Amino acid sequence: MTLRIPPLYALRAFEVAARFGSFTQAAESLCITQSAVSRHVKTLEESLGCQLFERRGSRLALTDTGRLLAQELKVGFRTIENACVAVNRQRDALRLKAPSTLTMRWLLGALDDFHLSHPQHRVQLTSAWMDLDAVDFHNEPFDCAVLLGNGGFPADWNRVKLFDEWLVPVCSPEVQGGSTWSAERLAQAELIHPSRDCRDWRRWLQRVGLIDVVAWQQGKLFDTLELGISAAAQGHGVSIGDLALVATELQKGALTLPFDQAVRSGDSYYLVWPATGETPATLTRMKDYLLQHLPNTDGRGVRLLD
């Protein structure tokens, strides 16, 4: 059987009185009378069947039970307050989760432009580091997400593919040295891995037939594609990048391609959301806008190996 919870007003009056150590100060904080606070605390003690305060003249002291209850209620009321603040802040806003590198290199700018074009539609973006992109719509406070994956999402999700991931080695012009690399040159280079399992380099090397030539298990390990790209631009070695997400650096000359072969990883970026109820108008507008403003995936000068 579920324990009957004492009245919320009594719990709140006790928590505030315990925090101040005074019925009078609690009454001022709650905008009620001192006698009302006293009655609420008495109601709570009778409901719980235990004494919460020891009254020593004009001073109040918590009993051991009262101290335990006050500690737990402090956490509980803070959780309730945070939830109310979050709901008020996010009211009428679409809550979107997205991986950090994609956010910094495309999505943040795209959403800024979306808000300028559609000021009546608000999207609250949360950028999250995810080794493997995932979202739990039951336990996380999101309405939709952009995830990198192979499309094998739950049956009760809607999904729209945004663009494919094309892996390509990138480095600074100084590291490249001005000419296309040979397999021997790559074998001597310092590899930069944007994931700790080295999966991106492994995929690229397998597809171009160099998996047995290059010691892909070695090199510097980073947690995100963003960090790997940044390290490569600073001249610390050669990293794997997503062709669409390094386009700006390639155009500016901050990065260059030591090889002209880009490999489709088999993953793509998808916009996903629960297939329950009617799709929010803001989500529909955002989806259409993103599909019309995708990052540059043009492989000019690069051979695309599907």
Image (cartoon, rainbow, N blue to C red):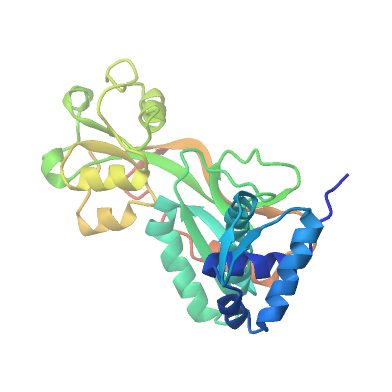
Query: Does 165 sit left or right of 15 as displayed?
Result: left
- In the rendered image, the residue lying farthest to the right is 1
Q: Is residue 86 visible?
A: no
Instruction: Please provide percent x and percent y for residue 47.
Output: 81, 58
Residue at point 78%, 66% (across, down): 43
Q: Is residue 108 visible?
A: yes
Q: Observer-nearest residue: 160 or 11?
A: 11
Residue at point 54%, 48% (across, down): 147
Residue at point 30%, 23% (across, down): 216
Q: Observer-nearest residue: 263 or 5?
A: 5
Instruction: Please provide percent x and percent y for residue 123.
Output: 56, 69
- In the rendered image, the residue lying farthest to the front is 57
Q: How many marks?
A: 0
Q: Does residue 255 lie above or below 222 as drawn?
A: below
Instruction: Please provide percent x and percent y for residue 91.
Output: 63, 74
Q: Quadrant of residue 94?
A: bottom right
Q: Quadrant of residue 5?
A: bottom right
Q: Does residue 71 lie above or below 29 as drawn?
A: above
Query: Does 298 sit left or right of 143 as displayed?
Result: left
- In the rendered image, the residue lying farthest to the top is 212
Give the position of the N terminus as an image quadrant. Answer: top right
Query: Does 292 sit left or right of 195 as displayed?
Result: right
Q: Does residue 26 lie above or below 304 as drawn?
A: below
Q: Observer-nearest residue: 147 or 189?
A: 147
Q: Quadrant of residue 155?
A: top right
